[in-house]
Image (tube, rainbow, N blue to C red):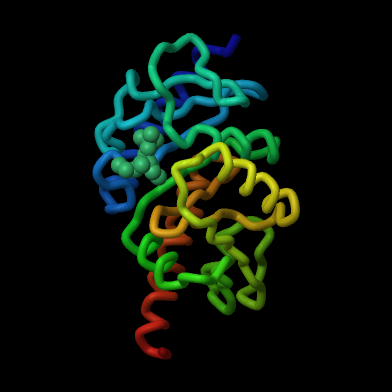
Amino acid sequence: MFDVTRYAEAAQSLIEAGRFLYANGWSPATSSNYSARIDEQHVAITVSGRHKGQLGAGDIMVVDLTGKPVQSNTRSSAETLLHTVLYEQFPDIGVVLHTHSVNATVLSRALAGEGRLELRDYELQKAFPGVGTHESTLSIPIFENTQDIEALSRETRQWFAEHPDQPGYLIRGHGLYTWGKTMADCLRHVEAFEFLFACELEMMKVIR
Ligand SMILES: CSC[C@@H](O)[C@@H](O)C(=O)COP(=O)(O)O
Ligand SMILES: [Zn+2]
């Protein structure tokens, strides 16, 4: 079983993250899902279909690392498996955030036919762990959107087994997944990605 105090802390951090992400326009219309690790085997995650700007304690539940609900009859996020494969694969991550911003959606569609977004020469790449210079490349995979989340979870697992240092991915026409050791780290990654996506879209207007 899991520690109730740690669950309450994780739930509170997800509630606060939801207010921030919704206020920024990155989690509109009940979209997005968030999770935080409680211990090696348990994760607090948003209940499916809830408004992410108005989350309360009843909107957060617990699943195990196979995505199975623990002590709950509610349905966890439809995309639970996209979270749990990351916790399984990266034992040191504590938080996963999935957002649906306009820029992530438009940029991933603008790059139709391309399987990656390569980010280079931006100072803000240093917001990600292990990046100490703008002279580096962040290779962000773009997976095709699908309603078959089990298949997508297998696809992401395989890609990140081969590219463990990349801090996130896009689903085309859908949104961003990113993670971090702490909530502060993960929120910084969302903000950094959003800044970089906006820059890429501006660059397309200037250069193409
Ligand atoms: C409101 S459409 C968005 C959903 O289809 C999904 O992509 C999403 O992010 C939220 O699903 P949820 O089951 O609430 O976690
Ligand atoms: Zn989504």
Q: Residue at x 66, y 73 (%)?
A: 136
Q: Can you say which quadrant of the picture contains the N terminus? A: top right
Residue sitting at 53 percent across and 21 percent down? 63
Quadrant of the rendered image containing residue 65: top right
Q: Quadrant of residue 68?
A: top right
Residue 116, how many percent across, how many down? Answer: 57, 67
Q: Quadrant of the C terminus?
A: bottom left
Residue positioned most to the right: 162
Considering only vertical position in the picture, is 43 above or below 18?
Answer: above
Ligand 1 shown in quarter: top left
Residue 134 placement, left or right of 177: right
Question: 142 above or below 30?
Answer: below
Q: Disc count in the image?
A: 0
Viewer-closest of 115 and 119: 115
- Name the side, left or right, on which 86 lies relative to 170: right
Q: Is residue 41 visible?
A: yes
The correct choice, above or below, for 51 with respect to 47 in the image is below
Give the x, y percent position of residue 12: 40, 27
**Is residue 17 in view?**
no
Residue at image position (26%, 48%) is: 23
Which one is nearer the viewer's eye here, 154 or 84? 154
Image x and y of residue 31, in percent:
32, 42
Looking at this view, is 144 or 133 the one in front?
Answer: 144
- In the figure, residue 169 lies in which quadrant? bottom right
Residue 166: % across, % down = 64, 57
